[in-house]
Image (tube, helix red, strand yellow):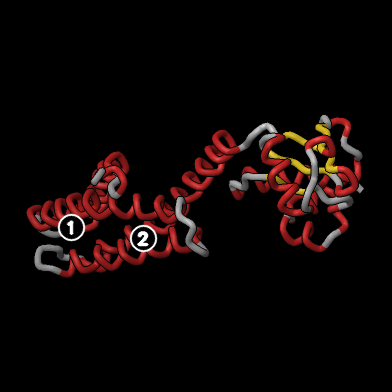
Amino acid sequence: MNIKNYFDMKNAAIGAGIMGGIVYLVNSSHETSEAITAGAKQTVYTFLVGGAMMKLCENIVNSNASQKVIKSIVYPTLATVGLTYGLHSLKGTPEPELSTLPTAIIAPIGFSIWQKMKKRKLEDNLGKDKMTDLIYAEIGKHGIMAGESLEKILIDTQKVFGNVSREEIKTIDEKNIPHNYYWSIRALKESQTALNLTGTHLLIRNYERTDGFRELFPELSRELVGMN
């Protein structure tokens, strides 16, 4: 088992130092020994639990879970705040509620920023690793198919349309594809990057006029409206 899959060492150390210092200051009006005890508990706790929660946030972002943006913030926040209050409710912390307050404020903000960073990194990696140079081919009367290779286009064309010979499949440069396929190509490239789609895809004429285009690609739809 690789601990890096479940624990963020770097952020655990940074968070431990910050939160330990804050909790020490919150309790500094009491006995010095009590303030040090509270700060030390927070430091150790933040390192152990904070590192695990940061990794939990990242793992949710990288998963296929539904509503993962919300879950990646809410789940780690609830766990972090609840455990923090439980820790400071034990003997040794003069101000358990005030000691928990910084965590209750910082945790949702921190997890929100972290999930956005991880989400952006994931999308960038998908764009680099999964975005391929598409090949386009005319499939006789059936239209234009896009795919990763001519072989895949041939195989999938035969699955969809029946017995189609290789002679009926003619490659075509993207620049030579009729303009009424433009938004279908744009949508395909967007979905490849964002959704990690692979395989072959039949282009749709005037795709921008369909309800599916407006529902699945709202940003492209807004761009289209802005052009008109």
- Residue 37 is left or right of residue 50, and the answer is left
Asked which secondary structure carries label 1, the reply is: loop
The amino acid pointed to by label 1 is Ser
Asked whether 50 or 29 is in front, the reply is: 50
Mark identifier at residue 91: none
At which x and y percent is residue 186? 77, 43
Identify the image quadrant of residue 164. top right
Mark 1 or mark 2: whose residue is earlier in sequence: 1
Q: Is label 1 or label 2 in front?
A: 2
At which x and y percent is residue 71? 45, 63
**Residue plotted at (29% across, 49% down):** 6
The amino acid pointed to by label 2 is Pro
Mark 2 nearby-residue class (10 Å; few <14, some 14–19, many ≥20): many
Residue pointed to by mark 2: 76
Asked whether 98 or 209 is in front, the reply is: 209
Query: Which residue appears farthest toward the left when viewing the image?
Result: 33
